[in-house]
Amino acid sequence: MALAFSLSSRVRIPDRVLFQDLQGELVMLELKKGVYFGLDAIGTRIWHLLGEQRSLQEVLDILVQEYELGEAEGTEDLLGLVTQLQEHGLVEVCP
């Protein structure tokens, strides 16, 4: 069962997830389920920020600054992506 999260949450990348940066895009493999997943350039940036154990709010703040996003749009996109990653077992919410 997936844990709920908010912007104050932190997520971690489990050891069972392999990933490779390929020309600015990321390809991931979740070994337990055999799930492949790909991210575009912005998703790849988010992945690397999540790997630094930043809170989702910190990730959002960086994205808003780097990509000139509105905070509401950035929040929706970030939480949507993290939800998808969590559903596929690619990230776990830190307790």
Image (cartoon, rainbow, N blue to C red):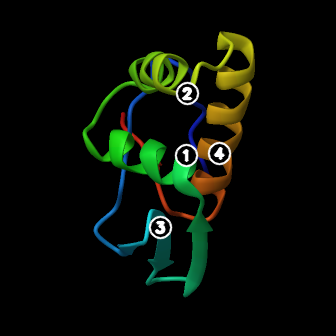
Q: Are marks 1 and 3 in contact (CB under 8 Å)?
A: no
Q: Are marks 3 and 2 in contact (CB under 8 Å)?
A: no
- List the residue tagged with mark 4: 81
- List the residue tagged with mark 2: 67
Task: Give the farthest residue toward the top.
Answer: 71
Residue 78, by quadrant, is top right
Q: Determine crowd level at label 2: few under 14, some 14-19, many 20+ residues with C-alpha closer than 10 A.
A: few
Of callouts 3 and 2, the N-terminal one: 3
| Disc number lying in front (3 or 4) | 3
Local secondary structure at mark 3: strand
Checking the image for residue 3, the label placed there is: none
Of callouts 3 and 4, the N-terminal one: 3
**What's the residue type where badge 4 is placed?**
Leu
Checking the image for residue 42, the label placed there is: 1
In this rendering, the count of numbered labels is 4
Report the Cα–Cα distance between label 1 and label 2: 9 Å
Q: Determine crowd level at label 3: few under 14, some 14-19, many 20+ residues with C-alpha closer than 10 A.
A: many
The residue under the point 59% across, 58% down is 40
Report the Cα–Cα distance between label 1 and label 3: 10 Å
| Disc number lying in front (2 or 4) | 2
Of callouts 1 and 4, the N-terminal one: 1
- List the residue tagged with mark 3: 26
**What's the residue type where badge 1 is placed?**
Ile
**Image height of 61 relative to 79, above or below:** above
Residue 39, horizontal then vertical, whole percent = 58, 61
Local secondary structure at mark 4: helix
Q: Quadrant of the C terminus?
A: top left
